[in-house]
Image (tube, rainbow, N blue to C red):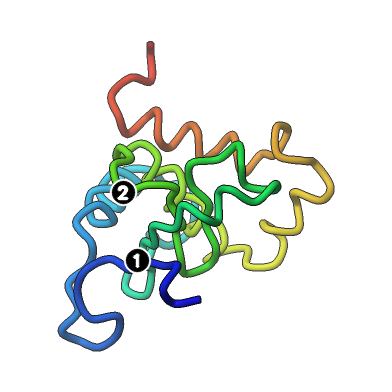
Amino acid sequence: MRALLRFAEGPLRGPGRVPDPRLVRAKERLDRLDWWPRPVRIGRVRIVVTPLLFRLRPWRRFDGFATHLVIFLRHAGVGDDLITHELCHVWQMQHRPITMPLSYLRTGYDRSPYERQARSAARLGSGTAGA
C-alpha cells in the first residue's frame, strides 16, 4: 500500500519538519479570512499524491480530497486554488471534526455549505473574487 502513495518531501514528523510550501501559501490565503475562531493549523497536515485513489468510483470526479490531516491529490501539478480549497476543508474539520464530514450525507456534495465556503476561500484568495 505504501508504494501507492508518494509523500511530500521531508520528514513526516518531528520538530525539524518543514511545512510544504504549497500549504504555507494556502494558509496565508486562509489567514486573511475570519470564518472560524482559530486560524488553520498546518503542522500535522500532509499532501499526498495518489492517482490510484482517483480511479475509484467515489473520487473520479475530483482532483483533490481532504481528510482531517491529509490532502490527497490526483497529481502533483495542481494550482494553489485547489490546495487552498482542500486546506479550507481541513480548517473546517479542525473546528467541526464530526459535523463537517457527516454533513455531506445530509446535503450531498453540490449543496454543501462547507463546499461553498471552500470554493469561496479559493476564489477570494486568488484575486478573482469579482470575476
Please state the horizontal and vertical placement of residue 127, each as a whole percent of the image: 28, 24
The answer to whether the residues at label 1 and label 2 have Cβ atoms under 8 Å apart is yes
Residue bearing the label numbered 2: 76
Residue drawn at 72 percent across, 61 percent down: 99
Q: Which amino acid does label 1 sit on?
A: Arg
The outermost residue toward the top is 131
Residue drawn at 30 percent across, 37 percent down: 79
Residue 109 vs 130, above or below: the answer is below
* Label 1 environment density (alpha carbons within 10 Å; few <14, some 14–19, many ≥20): few
Residue 6, numbered circle: 1
Drawn side of residue 118 relative to residue 43, left or right: right
Q: Residue 44, located in which quarter of the rendered image?
A: bottom left
The outermost residue toward the bottom is 14
SS for callout 2: loop
Residue 22 vs 124, above or below: the answer is below
Drawn side of residue 128 relative to residue 59, left or right: left
Q: Quadrant of the C terminus?
A: top left
Residue 130, numbered circle: none
Residue 16 vs 90, above or below: the answer is below
Q: How far apart are marks 1 and 2 (CA)?
A: 10 Å
Please state the horizontal and vertical placement of residue 52, each as a whole percent of the image: 52, 55
SS for callout 1: strand
Residue drawn at 73 percent across, 33 percent down: 111
Please state the horizontal and vertical placement of residue 24, each as a whole percent of the image: 23, 56
Please state the horizontal and vertical placement of residue 101, each as a whole percent of the image: 68, 58
Q: Residue 123, located in which quarter of the rendered image?
A: top left
Q: Which amino acid does label 2 sit on?
A: Ala
Drawn side of residue 119 relative to residue 29, left or right: right
